[in-house]
Amino acid sequence: MLLDAELSQLVLVDYQPRLMSAIFEAPLVLANAVRLAQVARMMQVPVWGTEQNPSKLGENPSELRALCQRTLAKMQFSAVEEGLGEWLRPAIKPPAGNARSLPKHLQKPSNMPSERSSIIIAGCEAHVCLLQTALHLLEDEFEVWVVTDACSSRTERNRDAAFDRLASAGVELVTTEMVVFEWLRSAEHGQFKSVQGLIK
């Protein structure tokens, strides 16, 4: 199954500088996260950020924060425990007005899942906040795609152990370019040249 931009949301987990200073391959990981967010904005894919204990670890870099629609401050390692799921799948509001005047199909709120149920997620640390958030998203019946080259931990061993566990749980492991080119689908896409410039 290929990713579809119209069904996708991007979640960027904890790229705070005080944390990133200890992260393996941090400059590359952050650059890929920024690139993903830039392309997501071009493709009208919602972008959400999280920050772990920002009073101690600070905020995400301003360039990344500016690309996010909202950023969730959290203390729990899983952002889902702090309400991320409600951002990704907002509660359905009942129709306004007199119910008797509405057609039958509008009289009850629909329980259909979010149209954007493919969650592309990247961040740090892969074996802690990213892993716990991704597993909770799976439990909440989202399709979860982890962008491996935009994720890391303080050590390669922890990062790779996270990827192994995520894959065995049913998460799709992808790279930044896989996500970008699946969103585009064709060299004839209106954003192809702009995106190509970011990738190069």
Image: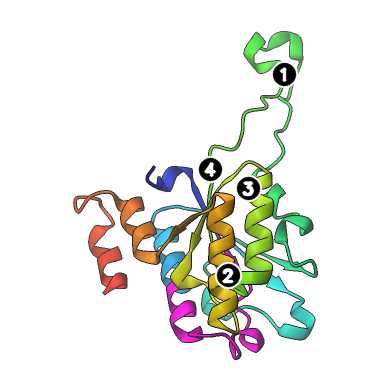
Magenta-colored stretch includes residue 170: no
Residue 100: x percent and y percent? 75, 8
Magenta-colored stretch includes residue 19: yes
The dot on residue 116 is 4
Q: Residue furthest left?
A: 188
In front of the other: label 3 or label 1?
3
Q: Which residue is mark 3?
A: 138
Q: Residue furthest bottom?
A: 21
| SS category of the residue bearing label 1 | loop
Tell me if residue 117 comes above or below residue 52 in the rendering: above
Residue 1: x percent and y percent? 39, 42
Residue at 65% in and 17% down = 106
In front of the other: label 3 or label 4?
3
Q: Which residue is mark 1?
A: 108
Measured Cα–Cα span from mark 3 to mark 2: 18 Å
The dot on residue 161 is 2
| SS category of the residue bearing label 2 | helix
Residue at 35% in and 59% down = 178
Q: Taking the image as drawn, is residue 34 in sight?
A: yes
Residue 90: x percent and y percent? 68, 42
The answer to which of 140 and 162 lies nearer the viewer is 162
Measured Cα–Cα span from mark 4 to mark 2: 28 Å
Q: Mark 3 near mark 1, Cβ–Cβ under 8 Å? A: no
Q: Earlier in the sequence, mark 3 or mark 2?
A: 3
Q: Earlier in the sequence, mark 4 or mark 2?
A: 4
